[in-house]
């Protein structure tokens, strides 16, 4: 069982199956329990970790864009993500940590904050010896850095069905 903990990127957008759906289609052995909630910051996501972890073998931790969107300190978001990774490991779970997607509607102002947070997320993954899921690079438009191609986003905030398919099939790897 894979517990997927996060915000709306984990929850999936209305009318679009989330990345977990596509990961399970790519590997039918995978069973996901989705604990994503739209609009939540990392401090709010953290309060649901133990419930998400119950009965799971693997924990996927995803979050941070709502901290950026709500003007919160990215260092605080990184600390919350590190605490979730450590808690998952304390519970005996294999843990993976996803980085933050490009944000078309927040570009260009949010891009430096997202890049700073993603650098911290990569550092956390290295220091805590957990797998990094490169959601950002999987959906970043090489011709428009800091943004997703229009066909990979439904609204400039969230992936489109094709974007979610790419995350599930290309970015997700079981730790």
Image (spheres, helix red, strand yellow):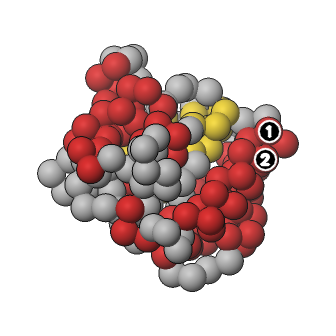
Indicate the position of residue 15 as horizontal and vertical percent values: 15, 51
Give 72 or 109, whichever is nearer the viewer.
109
Indicate the position of residue 137 as horizontal and vertical percent values: 52, 40
Residue on which the image places disc 1: 126
Give 169 or 23, whichever is nearer the viewer.
169
**Element assignment for label 2:** helix
- Name the quadrant of the C terminus: top right
- Which residue is located at x 43 percent, y 61 percent? 103
Q: Is residue 152 visible?
A: yes
Q: Residue furthest bottom?
A: 71
Residue 9: assigned label: none
- Which residue is located at x 72 percent, y 72 percent? 76
Give 7 or 140, whichever is nearer the viewer.
140
* Crowdedness near tag 2: few (<14), some (14–19) or many (≥20) residues, C-alpha within 10 Å: some
**Element assignment for label 1:** helix
Indicate the position of residue 150 as horizontal and vertical percent values: 26, 50
Q: Residue furthest front?
A: 143
Identify whether 131 is placed above or below 34.
above
Residue on which the image places disc 2: 123
Q: Is residue 61 visible?
A: no
Asked if residue 21 lies left or right of residue 89, the reply is left
Identify whether 65 is placed above or below 122.
below
Asked if residue 78 lies left or right of residue 3, the reply is right
Asked whether disc 2 touches disc 1, contact meaning CB atoms under 8 Å apart, the reply is yes
- Which residue is located at x 55 percent, y 26 percent? 174
- Which residue is located at x 79 percent, y 39 percent? 126
């Amino acid at each position: 069982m894979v517990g997927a903990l996060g915000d709306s990127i984990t929850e999936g957008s209305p009318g679009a199956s989330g990345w977990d759906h596509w990961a399970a289609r790519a590997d039918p052995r995978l069973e996901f329990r989705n604990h994503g909630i739209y609009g939540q910051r990392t401090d709010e996501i953290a309060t649901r970790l133990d419930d998400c972890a119950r009965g799971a073998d693997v924990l996927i931790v995803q979050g941070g864009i709502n901290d950026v969107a709500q003007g919160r300190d990215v260092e605080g978001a990184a600390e919350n993500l590190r605490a979730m990774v450590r808690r998952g490991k304390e519970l005996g779970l294999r843990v993976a940590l996803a980085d933050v997607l490009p944000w078309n509607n927040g570009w260009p102002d949010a891009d430096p904050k997202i890049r700073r947070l993603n650098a911290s997320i990569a550092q956390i993954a290295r220091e805590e010896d957990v797998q990094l899921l490169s959601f950002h690079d999987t959906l970043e438009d090489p011709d428009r850095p800091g943004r997703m191609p229009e066909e990979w986003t439904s609204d400039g905030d969230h992936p489109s069905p094709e974007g979610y398919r790419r995350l599930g099939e290309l970015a997700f790897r079981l730790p």
